[in-house]
Image (cartoon, grey):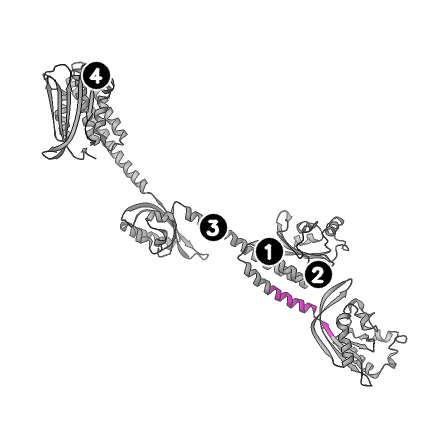
Amino acid sequence: MAARLRAFDWASHPLGPPSAWPEALKAAVGICLHSSMPTAIYWGPELRLLYNDAWSSIPAERHPDAIGRPAAEVWSDIWPTIGAEFASVMETGRGISHFDTRLEMRRGDRFEETYWNYSLTPIFGEDGRVAGLFNQGNETTLTVKTARMQAFRVALADRLNDVADLDATAILDTALGEIGRHLSVASVSYVEFDRLHGPKADRARWRSDGSLSVGLDPGEALAEAPLSEAVEGRAVSVEDAALDSRVAAEARRRWEAAEMRAAAAVPIMRQGRAVAAWVLGDGDPRRWDSVELDLVRDVGDQLWLTLDRADAAARLRVSERRFATLFEQSSAGLAELSLDGRFLRANEGMGLLLGRAPSELSALNILDVTHADDVPGTASRLAQAIQNRQSFSQEKRYVRPDGSTVWAISNVTCLVDDDGRPTGLFKVAADVTERREADSIRDALVAELNHRVRNNLSAVQALARQARSDSTSVHEFERAFNARLMALSRAQDLLMRETWVAAPLRDVVADTLAPYAVAGGERVTIEGPEVRLSPNAAVTLALVFHELTTNAARFGALSDPEGRVAVDWSVGHGPTGPAIDLLWRETGGPALSPPARRGFGSRLIERGAPGELGGSARLAFDPAGVSCAIHLPLSRKIMIP
């Protein structure tokens, strides 16, 4: 710089040749040129500028034309701000200093926000008055912006924490708005990338004035040079689209339509791949400095993590709501248990199963509601499930508050944390009481069926033997045997209708006499209270009434159109207790005389029925008609409902 000053044409300059300069100016210039600090001297009424090498970067492109020029010309862009300070020091002789002072300084063809530390010190002439100013300083723009960016990062982190529990839209709105206002840009967009198809439409966009972009979609802009470099993981910026040769003509027209002149795209990287990008836009040309782009990159990383957590939390909330709905609405019993078996929560299905309100179960242990006989097995299975971190199924009994027992099939799962440590138990239970009862009935029916089949085979064999001994011809044997088989079959049909539990006495009588009751209108009358017959009793009495009906149809009242049969019974008392007294009476038929011999039918009536059912039976062949009096004590075979 000393050489440049020596070569300067001072002869025609207002300051004159250096040899004629005042001693104060010579001394000040000597100090300035030998200082390692950025130092300048403003001399004379017009504050003509002289400076050293360290200070030459401050005027930037104004150097070296700034040498010897008045301060108001050199700093015309900031003179409205600093001019009064220069004048004050010149007038008062008191120096000033500033730290991190903001100055809107023109650099190139645009103004930029800059920050400075500087001091103005008076230089007194030989007459004791201020003849010039000694200026030292340096630019602190990078330091100030870095500190501000760091403070912004901390503040934004707090803001994102405040909205982290909200949905992604709220998080994006917060982040984009904060960074847009902080950087004073026209728009900020967040664009996510598709691994296969590149940029997608922007997920969110913030605009300083709330207006819509007309022709520039950030997703489309990222698909074209130069912003497309962001897809490859490189930050890229455009200071002025109108002058940047990298912006194609068609893209430039879209930028102009959207009134956008400057843009920057900063990728967000994950595992070496760009997964999203910030797209910043401004309506005026703008120089994007590294501090701003670094801030955007850091905030992008922070935003990605926050969105990832928010998306995971949203999925978790959806899953929890779905589970809560299933938990509450499931007809199956669901419950969460502590490791010691206490109910932590239970749904209505579990409450219905156990006969308690779900809220009551929180004071109980699973063993408290388990049948005493099943407690040891349940406790053992629970301990094994916790020890082995496994699930198990168990069919067992629960006891309700009223003492009733309910069967349920349960599946118990051991819940573990991320480290595999047991944290609790989850239980699913379904009521199988009806199924167990159905199984019991089925087993009983199968056993009963086996018993009945054997009995029926014995009965068929007996019928065949008796029919053979009483028959004088094959034809007579076939008729008698088939008729008795049909009677046995009707009894079986009746029992099937009653599911082999008990058959009504009235139905046994009515089924046997049905053909004659329909044909003769009032020929048959049946009267008596309701009596239920066990399967054995129903078959036995069906055969008895078959024999009586067959005899009446062949020889007695039912063989004559005017004949009548009346069957009635009542409940009375016999020698051993309550009993049924049943009377079969025939009237209006041909005159009868006692048979010469007793056949199978008579023996079945008088001996078979009492032998099977207890009581007695008396068959009388009066001339007016056959009668049969049967006395049957009440028992498990003969019952009154």
Compared to 374, does 81 lie above or below? below
- In space, the residues marked 4 and 3 are separated at their CA atoms by 76 Å
Total numbered labels placed on residues in the image: 4
- In space, the residues marked 2 and 3 are separated at their CA atoms by 46 Å
Looking at the image, do the residues carrying marks 2 and 4 touch, with CB atoms under 8 Å apart? no
| Badge 1 density bin: few <14, some 14–19, many ≥20, Cα 10 Å | many
Badge 3 or badge 1: first in the primary sequence: 1
- In space, the residues marked 3 and 1 are separated at their CA atoms by 24 Å
Badge 1 or badge 4: first in the primary sequence: 1
Badge 2 or badge 3: first in the primary sequence: 2
In the image, farthest residue toward the bottom: 127
Compared to 192, does 459 lie above or below? above
Q: Which mark is residue 321?
A: 3
- In space, the residues marked 1 and 4 are separated at their CA atoms by 98 Å
Mark nearest the camera among 4 and 3 is 3
List the residue tagged with mark 1.
Answer: 172
Q: Give the amino acid type for the residue marked by disc 2 in the picture.
A: Trp
| Badge 2 density bin: few <14, some 14–19, many ≥20, Cα 10 Å | some
Is residue 547 visible in the rendered image? The answer is: no
List the residue tagged with mark 4.
Answer: 479
Is residue 331 visible in the rendered image? The answer is: yes
Q: Main secondary structure of the magenta part?
A: helix
Q: Give the amino acid type for the residue marked by disc 4 in the picture.
A: Arg
Q: Give the amino acid type for the residue marked by disc 3 in the picture.
A: Arg
List the residue tagged with mark 2.
Answer: 288
In magenta segment, residue 144:
yes
Q: Which residues are magenta?
A: 137-154
Circle 3: element type: helix
